[in-house]
Image (cartoon, grey):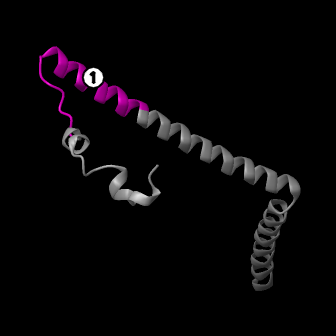
């Protein structure tokens, strides 16, 4: 009875090892590598689609806020108006005079 028990355990471990080795070997075949690459590219494309969708949703929300402010007769809150009007801001601080045309 004891030998039969250990034979069963050995068979089970053998099956698990063979299945794992077969999966690993299949992953390194050209077909397996192509499948893995396709899966990775699909995940990248899905992430990119999700990002673009998030940007579009944000744009729609911001546009709606601007339209609502306009409808109420409020001036649009331009956070960067001061910076654009400041003559010190611009290319002169980024590039020295000799590099400007």
> Would you place residue 88 above or below residue 63 in this image?
below
**Disc 1, SS:** helix
Q: Is residue 32 left or right of residue 70?
A: right
**Which image quadrant is residue 9 in?**
bottom right
**Which image quadrant is residue 17 in?**
bottom right
Residue 6 part of the magenta segment: no
Of 13 and 59, the residue lying toward us: 59
Question: Where is residue 27 shown, x and y percent of the image?
Answer: 80, 60
Q: Is residue 52 left or right of residue 14?
A: left
Point 30% across, 25% down: residue: 63
Of 58 and 40, the residue lying toward us: 58
Point 42% across, 30% down: residue: 56
Point 76% across, 75% down: residue: 13
Question: Where is residue 72 shown, x and y percent of the image?
Answer: 12, 17
Question: Could one spot residue 72 in this view of the protein?
Answer: yes
Question: Where is residue 45 shown, x and y percent of the image?
Answer: 61, 42
> Would you place residue 88 above or below residue 82 in this image?
below
> Would you place residue 45 above or below residue 2 in this image?
above
* Magenta residue span: 56-79
Q: Which residue was labeled with disc 1?
A: 64
């Amino acid at each position: 009875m004891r030998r039969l028990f250990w034979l069963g355990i050995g068979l089970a471990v053998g099956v698990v090892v063979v299945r794992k080795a077969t999966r690993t070997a299949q992953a390194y075949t050209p077909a397996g590598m192509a499948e893995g690459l396709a899966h990775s590219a699909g995940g990248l494309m899905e992430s990119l689609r999700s990002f673009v969708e998030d940007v579009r949703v944000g744009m729609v929300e911001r546009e709606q806020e601007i339209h609502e402010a306009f409808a109420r007769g409020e001036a649009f809150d331009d956070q960067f108006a001061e910076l654009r009007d400041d003559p010190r801001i611009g290319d002169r601080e980024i590039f020295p005079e000799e590099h400007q045309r």
